[in-house]
Structure formats: structure tokens, C-alpha cells
Image (cartoon, rainbow, N blue to C red):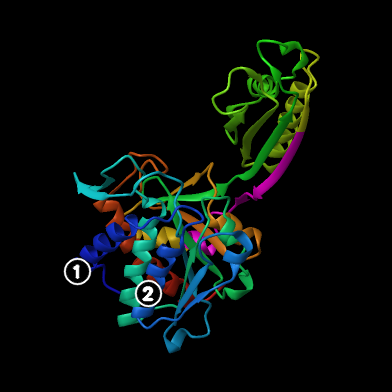
Amino acid sequence: MRPATEVERRRLHEVFAELCAIRSVSGEERAMADRVIAELRSLGLAVQEDGSAALTGLGSGNLLARIPAPRTRADLPPLLLCAHLDTVPHDGVVEPVHEDGGWVSAGDTILGADNKAAVAVLLVLARRLALEGSPVGVELLFTPGEETALAGASALEVGSLESAYGYVFDHASPIGEIALASPTYYRIQADFLGAAAHAGIRPETGRSAVRAAARAIVAMPHGRLDAQTTANVGHVHGGPPGATNVVPERATVLAEVRSLDPQRAEAVVAQVVDVLHDAANDPDGAVDVDITVARLFEGYRQDPDELAVRVAEDALRRCGYEPRHIVTGGGTDANALMALGGPATVNLANGTERNHERTERVSDDALEGMLDVSLALLLAAADAASVPSS
């Protein structure tokens, strides 16, 4: 299988720019899904969309398309390649522009390279394979709601997948990095309920939910707690909008805890819950508090000797990248698929930069490099399947 041609590289840039301009924040994936479906069906590929949208409230279901293996390898399981359709929330319209050897957003928005760089790569790869065939069978999976705690992939019926292993291209770091560990992630919501009162006439009869929330936030663990664990308060809301003359009756705090050590994650969550209760029960203005803890995805560690990892290393070297094993503090669809008992799924860095930020960028070298890596993965998987097991 030859490397990507100049025509394919130009096509990759055109598709990427087009996809970035399609609004697809989590829950609004319909237009993006329809564009992907249209592209795949134009290549003669059948596309299945599951019913997860009705279950999750997302804008589309999971999309699955298959490209068959050659008859000589028809008995081998296919290779899974996965990308997500959604982006984090943003205002305005994304206007992708090409400058200084890469793509950025012209306006005050994200670019959407997370994960549209991967979607574009898979669509251009699908065109090559549909026209010329593939050395191995391929399953292409496009998920909604990845940015909302992997909601789409978590709703997938993994029994519909035939792959033994696969890849997501979803880490914003240099190509060559292979994320072998990802954290367990908890979301904590605390709803404080006090008593409203006029702040200037009878403040002593009020009980401030905002003040209790503030006490909790100050006492909570925050930031990087150790090499494997982080905690963050991400959202605070309380009191009537714009009002200063009311002792606020209600306040909400949203926080998270992540750790590569699941027991450490549980311990920090317990610490956060204790802090929330202590803040609510402070004698200097006690309030009620309702706390909800949800484990949104489960962490994993992969053995460097796993077949999926070795195939990725082989593919990267074929393309001139030196493989490097890393751990990540982020979650991807790999977490969801493996937690459900699906294929061993490896997260490969795809060279995007500053994901979720207005300065998000992907260079030409990274975008085109991942197309070459995806082609090399097929060859490496075919070669690995040809080696007799010891």
C-alpha cells in the first residue's frame, strides 16, 4: 500500500476545512453525522446508525461502516478505527483558515481539530480503501457525545463490533506518542439549599448557600494532587441573577476527580464529599446539601506488549516516528469501548495542538502524517496477522 498521494493530501485538507465549518457541539451532531454518512455512502459503503441518540439525547447515533478484507484474509477480525463527531461548546461559527503551515480558527472559537482531524483522515482513508481495497478488514466507528463523558460510545452495543483491537486518534500531542493509561473520572455535583432573606433589612434570618459553597471550594483538593491524580471545580452558580440584595438560597458546585489509580480516585472523591458536608454544616450559617457522585468513565492500563500496541509502534516507525509510551489525564472513546468489553483500543496522539482552546491548531505535517499512519496501521496489522503465533 503506497503512501498518500498529493491528490489525497489536498483532499484531506479540503475535507478537514469543510468539517470544521460544520457546527457539531455535543448534542448537535446531526449535520456532521449526515455529512459523514453521505461521504461514506458515496463510496458505496453501507452505514449503520444505532439508536443511541434516543437514549442519550445526542444529535445522532453511533455510525459504523465496514470495509471488507481480501478473500485471503476474510477469516481474520477487522481493525477498528474510531473518531468522534462532536466538539466542546463554543459560541459563533468556526471559520477555519490556513496560515503558517497549519489550520487555525479565524474567529473567537475553537477550530474543532479535536476530533475532526481524525474524522477527515478516516474519510480520506475510506476513499482509498473503497477504490483500491484494503489489506485487512476495517471497521470505521464515528461516535457522538465524546466530549460529554463519552456518552455516545458508552451507549454503543459493543457486540456489533467484530474487531479484536483498534485505535482512536484523540490525543493533542506529537505524533508518536501512545497513551497506555487513562484515568478513572468522577463528576461531583453539590446543590446547597439555605434560606433567602433581604440582605439589607433582615440578613440574620437568611442562610447563604453561596457562602457555604465558597467554604467548600476553598477547602476542596484542587489541581494536581500527585503524579496520577487531579481535582477541579469547574462550575459554580448561585443566587438570583444580578441581585445583591438577597441572601442567596441556592448554589450549585460542579467538580471532578481523575486518577490513574482507581482507589486513589475513590479516596479523593470521599474527601471532596466530606468537605462539602462540613461546609454545609458549619455553625456559622448551616445549610442543606444534596450531593451526587457519578463515575463517568473507567480508567485503564495497557501492557506495552499487547498486539495493538506493537502494531501501532510498527506503523509509526514505518512513517518515521519514534514511538513513545505516555499516560494521559484525559478520557477518550477507548475508555468507554474497553469498559464495555469491546476491542482493545489504543489512543494515538495525532499532533493537534491546544485542543478545547481558541488557539487550537493542527499543522499540515500532523494532519498529513496521520493519514500516512492510518495507512501504515493497515499494513502493520496485515503483517502481524501473517506471523504465526509461537
Distance, label 1 to label 2, CA atoms, is 20 Å
Say how many tags the image has. Answer: 2
Q: Is residue 93 left or right of residue 331?
A: left
**Residue 276 vs residue 303, the one in the foreground:** 276
Q: Residues within 10 Å of mark 1 (few under 14, many from 20)?
A: few
User: Residue 301 appears at what percent x and percent y?
Assistant: 60, 50
Name the amino acid type tagged 2: Ala
Q: Which residue is mark 1?
A: 7
**Residue 325 vs residue 337, the one in the foreground:** 337
**Which residue lies at the image location 55% right of the left edge and 57% below the top edge?**
334
| 293 drawn magenta | yes
**Which residue lies at the image location 71% right of the left edge and 35% below the top edge?**
269
Q: Earlier in the sequence, mark 1 or mark 2?
A: 1
Q: Which residue is mark 2?
A: 38
Name the disc covering residue 255, or none: none
Quadrant where the N terminus is found in the figure: bottom left
**Residue 385 vs residue 75, the one in the foreground:** 75
Name the amino acid type tagged 1: Val
**Which residue lies at the image location 62% right of the left edge and 39% below the top edge?**
259
User: Residue 26 appears at what percent x and percent y?
Assistant: 50, 53
At mark 1, the secondary structure is helix
Q: Which residues are magenta?
A: 290-310
Mark toward the viewer: 1 or 2: 2
At mark 2, the secondary structure is helix
User: Residue 332 appears at what percent x and percent y?
Assistant: 53, 53
Asked if 156 appears above or below 133 in the picture, the reply is: above
